[in-house]
């Protein structure tokens, strides 16, 4: 298993490390196995709100003291909340690892949830929600997601809504924190100039006293939907388009074929969407595809921004690419280019301690084990052109295509017939 180390404390907390002797930095992360997908409808946005509030003070440190301590060592402190995970991370010089560990553990173990700080931070989150409404690229993808996973936890916005965030009182926030920030739901991951035994000792010192327990909750299976939806926003100059079909779960056997299909379709300047829609037709500045995968499901989606009068042409061009991938086997040269693109992206992404730390944690959270990059590269190489075509025939089904269009949509008319993939 290369030089990756793993230990599980008696209370269920997992500790992962990967030494990188050639660097001076250490990236440390405390990962939570729950995100917005674990919320109930009335608590939508609480996981993200908790993330914000953990930086607003603990019983030992104020928010200002946290900021000053991190700045005093030239470190970087960050966090994010996703659909299925949350992460609190720090990147510091190796000499400052004990302090970074102390700060991160203090954040995730002993937040104050001060009522005055809560109200101030609530206003910040409400502004963040408004900011997304003002960003059409983000908004069209959010609307698409809500419709693709309609009336399901995956479809609810990570930020929550103005209504739900306004209703999050201290008891609800603290209750969610107590239920989900338990040791069996936490992973401590570190990469850089470190010693595994030292990280394990720090984990025992800061987390070893916690009582192991499980919240006993299981995620409800997600089921993709295929609506055609429109949102009128008169002040926009462009029509923003998001189309998608069911994708793969993070652990599916055919995930490597999905990666290649998405790469060929819309990753990079040599991709089919970029070449045909932007370069040859000049219909869009931004056009690309992406694969969003979760524990049990996923979505392969395409985004494009274009003028109102060209919206129909762009949709037809995207559908044409779907159809062509079904009808014609990918040429060896194109498949080779896609494989090299994926391999290069993978290896380049693992050059920093931060990305290595994240890779360790994600593999543990979704696979319970570590797969070296070399094995991933071999799996990419094993995918054949016939597999890519077979996958395209399976997923690019007219009945499965979902579409969202955002903009000043007067006169725009699109129907299921316009999504005919053959």
Image (tube, rainbow, N blue to C red):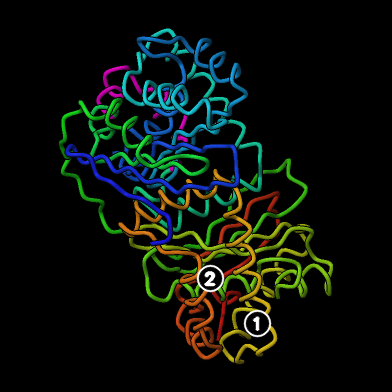
Where's residue 255, x and y in %?
45, 71
- Structural distance between the alpha carbons of marks 1 and 2: 13 Å
**Vertical order, 170 against 15 (above or below):** above
At label 1, counting other C-alpha atoms closer than 10 Å, the crowd grade (few under 14, some 14-19, many 20 or more) is some
**Vertical order, 3 against 193 (above or below):** below
Residue appearing at x 36%, y 66% in the figure:
251
Residue appearing at x 61%, y 52% in the figure:
351
Where's residue 391, x and y in %?
48, 82
Residue 37, image quadrant: top left
The dominant secondary structure in magenta is helix
Report whether residue 221 is seen. yes
Can you identify the residue that label 1 sits on? 336
Looking at marks 1 and 2 on the same chain, the residue that comes earlier in the sequence is marked by: 2
Where's residue 410, x and y in %?
70, 54
Residue 344, image quadrant: bottom right
In screen coordinates, is 64 left or right of 331? left
For residue 259, which numbered disc appears in the image?
Answer: 2
Q: Nearer the viewer, mark 1 or mark 2?
A: 1
Q: Which residues are magenta?
A: 157-176
Label 1, secondary structure: give it. Answer: helix
Label 2, secondary structure: give it. Answer: helix
Return the residue nearer the eye: 110 or 7: 7
């Amino acid at each position: 298993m290369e030089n990756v180390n793993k230990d599980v404390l008696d209370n269920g907390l997992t500790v992962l490390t990967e030494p990188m002797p050639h660097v001076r930095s250490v990236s440390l992360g405390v990962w939570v196995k729950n995100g917005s997908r674990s919320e109930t409808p009335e608590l939508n946005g609480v996981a993200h709100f908790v993330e914000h509030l953990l930086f607003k003070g603990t019983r030992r440190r104020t928010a200002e003291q946290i900021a000053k301590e991190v700045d005093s060592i030239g470190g970087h402190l960050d966090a994010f909340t996703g659909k299925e995970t949350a992460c609190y991370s720090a990147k510091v010089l190796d000499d400052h690892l004990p302090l970074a560990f102390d700060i991160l553990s203090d954040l995730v173990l002993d937040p104050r949830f001060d009522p005055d700080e809560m109200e101030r931070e609530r206003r910040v989150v409400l502004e963040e929600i408004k900011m997304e409404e003002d960003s059409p690229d983000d908004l069209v993808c959010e609307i698409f997601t809500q419709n693709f996973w309609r009336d399901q936890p995956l479809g609810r916005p990570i930020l929550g809504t103005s209504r739900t965030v306004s209703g999050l009182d201290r008891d609800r926030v603290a209750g969610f924190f107590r239920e989900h920030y338990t040791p069996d739901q936490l992973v401590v991951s570190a990469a850089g100039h470190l010693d595994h035994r030292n990280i394990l000792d720090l984990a025992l010192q800061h987390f070893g006293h916690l009582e192991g327990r499980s919240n006993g909750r299981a995620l409800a299976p997600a089921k993709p939907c295929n609506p055609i939806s429109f949102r009128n926003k008169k002040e926009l100059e462009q029509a923003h388009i998001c189309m998608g079909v069911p994708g793969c779960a993070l652990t599916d056997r055919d995930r490597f074929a999905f990666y290649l299909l998405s790469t060929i379709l819309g990753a990079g300047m040599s991709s089919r969407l970029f070449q045909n829609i932007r370069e040859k037709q000049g219909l869009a500045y931004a056009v690309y595809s992406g694969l969003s995968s979760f524990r049990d499901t996923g979505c392969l989606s395409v985004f494009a921004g274009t003028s109102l009068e060209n919206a129909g042409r762009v949709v037809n061009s995207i559908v044409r690419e779907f159809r062509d991938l079904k009808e014609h086997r990918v040429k060896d040269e194109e498949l080779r280019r896609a494989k090299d693109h994926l391999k290069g992206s993978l290896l380049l992404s693992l050059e920093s301690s931060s990305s290595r730390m994240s890779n360790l944690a994600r593999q543990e959270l979704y696979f319970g084990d570590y797969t070296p990059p070399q094995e991933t590269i071999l799996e990419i190489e094993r995918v054949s052109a016939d597999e890519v075509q077979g996958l395209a025939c399976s997923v690019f089904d007219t009945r499965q295509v979902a579409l969202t269009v955002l903009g000043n949509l007067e006169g725009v008319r699109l129907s299921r017939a316009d999504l005919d993939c053959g």
